[in-house]
Every structure is written in structure tokens, then in C-alpha cells.
Image (tube, grey):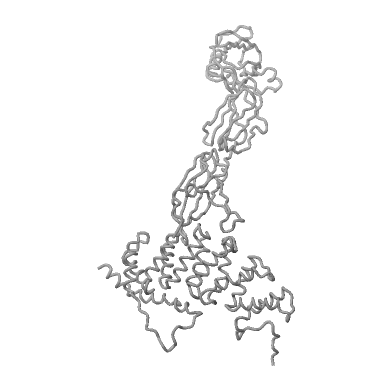
Amino acid sequence: MKLLLRKNSLAGRSLFGAALLALMGVAGGGVSWAQTPAPATQASRDHLKVPVELEWEEVPGAKIYELEFQNLDGKSIATFRSSSSVFKFKFKVGKYRVRSRVADERKVFGVWSDLQEFTVKPKEITVPENSIATKGVIDPKTLTGEVVFHWGPAPGAGQFLVKVMNEKDEVVKEELVEGLSCKMHLEAGNYHVSVTAVGPQGIQSDPVNLPGKVVIDTVQLAKPVIALEEVADPKNPKTKVQRLSQTRGLPTVRWKNASAIADTVGTLEYAYFFGEEWLPVAEFVSKNAKEVILEKATKPGRYRISAWAEASGLKKSEVTTYEFVVKPTEY
Amino acid sequence: MKLRGAVFLLVFCALNAQAVAEVKSAQERENTYSPPLLPQEEKAAPKTCESFSEFKEAYEVLVRDADLALGEEKAARLALRISRGCNGSAKRFFKAYDMMKKTGVALTRAVDVGLEFSRLDDERLKNFNEVFAKMYLENSFDFDFATAYKVSFELSRDYEGKARDVREDFVKLVKFCTQSDKASLPLRQCAELALKIVNHTPKFAGGLYGEFEKFYSFLRTDKRIGLSVIEALNLVPKVFAYGPKAPENFRKGLEYATTSHKINIDHTNAVHLALNLARHSLPLESKEEDPHEAPSEKK
């Protein structure tokens, strides 16, 4: 004979079951708790109470089943008697102790079983459609993308623990919130999210995974733009020509709208006239700088600047190239 | 000892060097529009070359050139090729080579340019150096490398005529057309016009600048023509194409057509007549048909 005391988070249920079984003179067996779904209206009326259903296998000869629930201080908070093998009741989320006994047809009760501690957990959240809202790309200024998670109410829960896990199942972000939504800023990547309902004393429901993945793409940085100097064409003063600025006679690269979040990285190469190969001359990193003086561009010949924007968490920009010639001043 | 070994190896490339040297000589091109100085029967004594001095001079500099880093054998081979250009070839080589190297030309190409000028005369090298410097330097015409390089070769190595004439014409024309009290043209336009005009320098013994100044002055000051600076400068090469007599024939024809009572034509036709007369300043070539005559019927 086996008593099934169904509630999914009942701690020490085997002892409780064992106690009852001992009472009935039956060895072995176990107990379990089942938390049946409750209608949303009921949950909203009394959201801190969680419906609990207790069911067990009938004991031959037993006419009355009695269960007494106590809080952890030993104070009795409820006693149920039933001739059937099912109890339905509502309890607040919390930790309790329970003991049981049965009476025969003479209404003579046996001894109480040992006390068994169990926990009533909040219900799991419900998941609405479109529970994840995001643009799916990061903001280049913050290097993160905004994501908003939504979920439905969970009886017994006053808070919700939102966990964001990366592709390796490592928790990258965790937040305890009180409402039914949560806004987070995540770096570029693929994530999945679980929401756990949390009741009084931090008692948690089982986690529920929000459907689908959260995909936050990185964005490509804007290509650096060289601000060229416009001067009258010495060969034709009516027209203008563009060229690199000069600093103490040295070619100088000035950036248009230098990025505050990215470094401008680049190379300076040299090629001979009629030469096919570009030879590296210098590399530069311009951190928030608006200009780079090309101090090594002194030898006459052809030069090529290749520059791009770089920032952690962002895609490199396309490469900007610019070629110029350094002429001798005399022969 | 090493040098001796290298020279021994050079015997094998001497023939090759000779083959490369099969280009029209500077003297041949200098004489394109000038009569031979000596009668055919009086042959001048054959010119001799101080080839060893040229070889030695070239070798000793080449072997020390850290950029080229030729080593003795290659330096000797190159010096031998340079010495093929006869007297002054080593100096010409280095003047052209150094200029190209200083410009940023690949060393192999700079050597090629040096070799080309080592085999030409000093005047052509001077044309190359002066025209290139004028065309390329930022404080001068500031042309791009490709244009400066091309024009410099056109007015030196490839020029069919007296090198000095074209150099002086080019320099004077550019000065003329950029001077504020003369044509005052933008540099590029001026250089392009000057190049068009100096194409005809070989037709004018001693250069065309003198004739140009006279003709341009006539075009600009003659009220009957009333040409702008650009129109006048564009007309010059069209007339000068027909040789040294063409400007005069143009001028006389125009004056006659516009002033004589014996001919009564309007201004446009007068200019057409003058242009045709300029064109007729060169004799009709046998194969050339006269567009003013009706084609003869075949019998």
C-alpha cells in the first residue's frame, strides 16, 4: 500500500511517506506532491496562495485520513480530515511541516507519524507570445543592445529571477525584478533566457525558459573619413584641388567626425614609381585623436594610407585608403 | 683582382650591350632639319670614345651605391653598359639616374632611364632634367609624375630635332603664357599649349619662340582679327604646323584680304584664306591631293 502525497517540491517526502506507511504498517513506498494549475482570475485574487492537491493511495480499513500542517515554529496552522484519498487546499508559499494519521471504522486514530518538512513553491510563470522584444543590434555608443522580456503572472510569486545564459550556458546576467517585464542591455551574442518565480523567503519555482533565442548582432563601425584640405589649384586658380593637410611640412591625416568609441587604426605604405609592391612604413593608432602626422612620409615617392575604425565588441569598419605623392623640393 | 674577374665576365655581355645600343644616334636626330655640315665626300675623322674612363667612373660610383647594392660583378656589368654611351656617358647616367631616384622611381627603372641618357647627348639629358623638374616640382608646374615623365621623354629622348631649341622654346613659352602682363594663363593650360606649340619647333631653325612672339603680337593687336588670348594661342600651332614661312603667309594674306581694294571678301573668309595660305607654305607632297582642285578624271 502506498500513499502518494503529491506536491512537486515537497522536501523529505520519503520520510513523510515512510511515516505514514509505518502508521499503516506498510514498509517502503514514497510520496509526491502535485501542484495543479489554477485559473488566472483566482491567482490574481489571491496571488500569494498556491493551490495544492494532496492525494494518496487508499489504506485498507482506514475510514478517516487526518493531516496536520504546522509552521516551522511547530504551531498548527491547519488540520484536514477526509474520507477520500484527495485533499485540495491553498497554501501560501512557504515551508511547512506535516504529519498524518488514520482512523478505523471505530473512529479510533492511530499515532501521528513523524513530522515531515515540505515547501510550497510559487507557480511557474506563464509565457505569452512575443516574450522577447529587441532590435537585435547593439548601439555603437554603449556596445550593447536593449532587450525587453515579458512573462505572465505566477501565483505565489512576488518577484522574478531573470537569468540570461550564453551559448555555453554560462549565466551572463541575472536580475531580480518585481514586475512582469524586465529590460536588459546585452552585448552582442546569442542568448537564452529563463525566468523563475520567487516567493516569500526566496522560495523559487522551477525556471521556465522563454521561447526562442535572443540574438544581438554587433554593428560595423563607420569607415573613417579623411578631411582633405581644399586649396586653389596652382595650375588653374579657378578650380580647387584636395590634398592632405600639412603640419610643419609633413602630410597630416585629419579625420572627419572622429569616433569617440573607436580607435582609428591604420598603416602607411610606400611604393616607388613603377614599383608594384607596397612597402610598410609605419602603423598608427589614433585614440580619439583628430589627426595623425605622417612623420615618416618624407622620402619622395608614392604613399598609401589604409585606415579603419576598431572597437571591442564592434565589427571593424571598412578600410579607407588614400594615396598621395611626396615630391622632392628641388633637384 | 675581383675587378679583373668581373671585367672578364663582361666580355660575354659586350655583344649584348652593342645590340641594345642600336638606336638612332643623337647626332642623326640633331641633323634632321639641318643640312650636313660637310660635303659627302669629306668624311670627318671617326669619333673616338674614352670608354675606360667612363667605365671606371661609373663602376667606382656604382659599387659604392648602397641602395643599388650591386656587388662588384653586377656593378662592372652595368658600368660596361654605361661606357657604351661614349664620352660623358657616366655623368649622363648618374644625372638621369639620380634625378629619378630622388623622385622615388624604382631603382631598376631609374637605372634604365640612366642607361638611356648615357647613350644620348648632353643636350637631350639637359632637356630631360630641366623639363622634368619644371613639370614635376610643386613650386613649378606641379604636374603629376606620369605626365611630367612622359613629356620629359617627348622633349628629350624622343624629340626629332635640336634638343636645345625645343628646351628653350618650351621654357620661354611657358614663361610667356604664365606672365601676368602677357597671356597669364593657368599653369596647366599654359603647359599644354606650350607642348602643342613646341611640337613644331623642329621646323624652325634655331627655335620658334621669336616667330611665336611676333605672330602672337600680330594676332592680339590687329583689330581686324580681334582674337582673345586663348584663341590666339590656339591658332599658333595650327599655323606653325606648316613651317617657318606659314606665319608670314598667314599675316600677309590676312592683311591683303582685309585692306586691298582688289579683293572683296568678308572677315571670316579672309581668315580662311590666310589659313589656307599658311597651309600652302609647305610644298605639295606628291601623294597629297589639293582639296581646292577638282579630282582629275581617269583616262
Q: Residue at point 63% right, 71% down? A: B218
Q: Is residue A258 left or right of residue B121?
A: right
Q: Is residue B200 left or right of residue A272?
A: right
Residue A55 is situated, as x and y percent measured from the top left of the image, at 62, 19
**Quarter holding residue B258:** bottom right
Residue A125 is situated, as x and y percent measured from the top left of the image, at 63, 26
Q: Is residue B290 left or right of residue B67?
A: right
Q: Is residue B232 above or below residue A2?
A: below
Q: Is residue B113 above or below residue A189?
A: below
Q: Nearer the viewer, residue A2 or B181?
A: B181
Question: Among all residues in the image, which is located at the extreme bottom?
Answer: B299
**Quarter holding residue A36:** top right
Residue B15 is situated, as x and y percent measured from the top left of the image, at 37, 77
Q: Nearer the viewer, residue A201 or B69?
A: B69
Q: Is residue B69 above or below residue A256?
A: below
Q: Residue at point 34% right, 66% down? A: B75
Viewport quadrant of the N terminus of chain B? bottom left
**Quarter holding residue B63:** bottom left
Q: Nearer the viewer, residue B17 or A296?
A: A296
Residue B110 is situated, as x and y percent measured from the top left of the image, at 43, 64
Exactly how many numbered labels are in the figure?
0
Q: Is residue B144 above or below residue A165?
A: below
Question: Among all residues in the image, which is located at the extreme left?
Answer: B1
Viewport quadrant of the C terminus of chain B? bottom right
Q: Nearer the viewer, residue A138 or B256?
A: B256
